[in-house]
């Protein structure tokens, strides 16, 4: 059966249609969810059975045009950088194998030049033994085009160092394998992240939509140096590795291993960042830590186990004297195993500068209880350095292109059921993270594999040691034990990423001569095809096909 998602702007939301003014077109596909027309209960805005989120009356997925009339990269997109559209008129690279390089590999698409789209005719884990970096601008990695169970990209450190980058429906993992044949060589064991967005020269317009980021060793996700206009939506950022191969910065040997396990770090040179409807969890802290010029942090689930803190905002004076770091922190849910005394936000100062923050409509659940609190801003905030550099705002910051301010904390299931690379086609790791958050169980783990890395075990047995200032290290034998940490599927976590399925996209996606054709919706045929593929991995177990797009650019989702 095919279900057609249509948003009728002339009959239901005529004001939006007037803005978009598509000629001779009553029904224009913009979203699988209800637009700004408030609680739509009839016609094309009504809920579709079995379609999570199809009935939502929220406006965060509406198409809001850019300053020059641009459409967002995907229907309903809001945030910073979302008007970059590498797929609008692009070369198509077909990924046909899981090789680390060579013809038909993902690396061949990453290393290409000019606007390009990576589509996948194979599923499985693409493993790199050395760090993998996206360095060339104008790329759209469309993981939604892969057959079940999708694409996992694993390297010691994955990074984006380019502008105009869109990544959708992909899993990124770091790895805890030693980088050098010489087990005494610690080079490269400090800043190993599942994904880093970083550049000293300056990059902008990076969009992560429905991405799973797991097994961070330094952190899971870092946004660092001269980076601007980043949007992260519907993403699962969880599962740091605690007692792993992280070496203290500046250390030249294995005698100062750190228990790290941090989550999301946004540096003090970073510009505008939007993080919406994502999950941050199973990490010690940095949920997130931000020195961004403007952070819009909205409707996220933040799950904290163990010690430490949720979010931290710090002044930009380290690089920008007297320039404020700013944030709207709104509509989020914070869950902590601690029964009392937990603060949501720490304010830290680096030299000069201030923090301007609007904090509203967040909830805090302490002790894994079921009674959410709505702490006032003053009770939720800790001035860590007693610097008095916080300006607590009564009105939200007017941040261009940011989301609207939610009127209440987000319902947990609304986020948990829709996050990650392929919400309708989750691998066991994603299934267990979501289930454990709902059940309020599970601890931070130490190792990437159940038996541990044999070469690193040799390093430990040869006298390597962890800094025990904050944490008591486990014994070598217990370091990778999971039975007492609330997790059951470790072997399945990795094995499931190795499932290889193949199928051709010939006949499924628009032919090369038609891909750049602009439809009445304003999107190209190739873009509309990617939207249809997204609907399928987000909402059901179907595969995508160009038959799920009509002449106007409306997208179908297969059931």
Image (cartoon, rainbow, N blue to C red):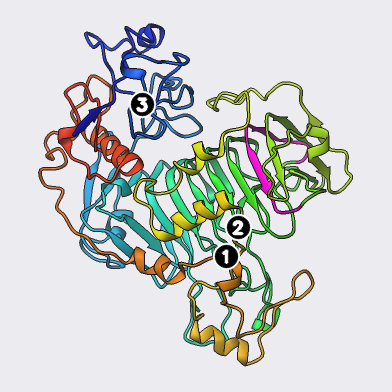
> How far apart are the alpha carbons under marks 1 and 2?
6 Å
Quarter placement of the N terminus: top left
- Marks 2/3 in contact by CB < 8 Å: the verdict is no
Q: Dot 1: what SS?
A: loop
Question: Residue 343 location in percent, x, y?
Answer: 78, 45
- Disc with the residue nearer the chain's start (2 vs 3): 3
> How far apart are the alpha carbons under marks 3 and 1?
38 Å
Is residue 315 at all visible to an observer of this figure? yes
The residue positioned 73% from the left and 50% from the top of the image is: 367
Residue 188 highlighted magenta (yes or no): no
Vertical relation: 114 (above or below) 190: above
Q: Nearer the viewer, residue 265 or 205?
A: 265
Residues shaded magenta: 321-338
- Residue 486 is tagged as 1
Q: Dot 2: what SS?
A: loop
**Residue 19 picture quarter:** top left
The residue positioned 48% from the left and 69% from the top of the image is: 175
- Marks 1/2 in contact by CB < 8 Å: the verdict is yes
């Amino acid at each position: 059966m095919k279900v057609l998602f249509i948003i009728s702007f002339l009959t239901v939301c005529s004001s939006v249609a007037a803005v978009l003014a598509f000629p001779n077109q009553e029904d224009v596909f913009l979203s699988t969810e209800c637009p700004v027309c408030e609680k739509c209960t009839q016609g094309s805005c009504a809920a579709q059975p079995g379609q999570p989120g199809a009935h939502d009356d929220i406006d965060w997925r509406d198409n809001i045009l850019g300053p020059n009339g641009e459409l967002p990269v995907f229907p309903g997109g809001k945030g910073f950088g979302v008007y970059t559209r590498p797929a609008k008129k692009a070369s198509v690279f077909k990924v046909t194998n899981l090789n680390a390089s060579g013809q038909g590999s993902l690396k061949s698409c990453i290393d290409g030049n000019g606007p390009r789209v990576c589509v996948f005719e194979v599923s499985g884990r693409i493993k790199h033994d050395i760090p993998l970096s996206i360095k060339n601008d104008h790329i759209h990695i469309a993981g939604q085009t892969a057959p079940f169970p999708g694409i996992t990209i694993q390297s010691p450190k994955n990074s984006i160092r380019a502008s105009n980058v869109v990544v959708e429906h992909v899993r990124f993992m770091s790895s805890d394998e030693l980088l050098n044949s010489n087990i005494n060589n610690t080079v490269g064991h400090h800043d190993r992240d599942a994904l880093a967005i970083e550049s000293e020269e300056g990059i902008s317009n990076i969009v992560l939509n429905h991405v799973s980021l797991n097994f961070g060793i330094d952190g899971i996700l870092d946004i660092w140096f001269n980076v601007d206009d980043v949007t992260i939506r519907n993403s699962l950022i969880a599962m740091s590795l605690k007692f792993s191969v992280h070496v203290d910065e500046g250390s030249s040997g294995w005698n100062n291993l750190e228990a790290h396990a941090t989550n999301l770090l946004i540096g003090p040179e970073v510009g505008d960042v939007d993080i919406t409807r994502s999950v941050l969890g199973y990490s010690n802290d940095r949920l997130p830590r931000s020195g961004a010029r403007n952070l819009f942090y909205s409707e996220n689930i933040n799950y904290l186990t163990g010690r430490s803190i949720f979010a931290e905002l710090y002044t930009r004076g380290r690089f920008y004297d007297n320039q404020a770091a700013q944030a709207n922190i709104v509509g989020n849910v914070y869950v902590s195993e601690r029964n009392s005394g937990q603060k949501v936000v720490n304010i830290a100062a680096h030299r000069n500068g201030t923090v301007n923050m609007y904090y509203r409509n967040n909830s805090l659940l302490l002790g894994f209880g079921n009674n959410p609190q709505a702490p006032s801003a003053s009770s939720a905030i800790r001035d860590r350095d007693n610097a008095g550099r916080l300006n607590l705002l009564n009105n939200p910051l007017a941040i261009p292109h940011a989301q609207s301010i939610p009127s209440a904390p987000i319902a947990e299931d609304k986020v948990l059921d829709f996050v990650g690379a392929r919400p309708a086609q989750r691998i066991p790791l994603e299934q267990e993270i979501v289930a454990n958050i709902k059940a309020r169980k599970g601890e931070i783990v130490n190792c990437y594999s159940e038996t541990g890395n044999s070469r690193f075990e040799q390093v430990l047995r040869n006298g390597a040691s962890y800094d025990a200032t904050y944490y008591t290290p486990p014994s070598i034998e217990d370091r990778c034990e999971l039975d007492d940490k609330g997790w059951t599927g470790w072997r399945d976590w990795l094995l499931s990423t190795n499932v290889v399925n193949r199928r051709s996209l010939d006949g499924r996606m628009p032919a090369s001569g038609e891909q750049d054709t602009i439809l009445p919706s304003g999107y190209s045929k190739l873009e509309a095809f990617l939207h249809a593929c997204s609907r399928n991995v987000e909402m059901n177990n179907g595969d995508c096909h160009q038959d799920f797009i009509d002449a106007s650019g409306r997208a179908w989702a297969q059931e």
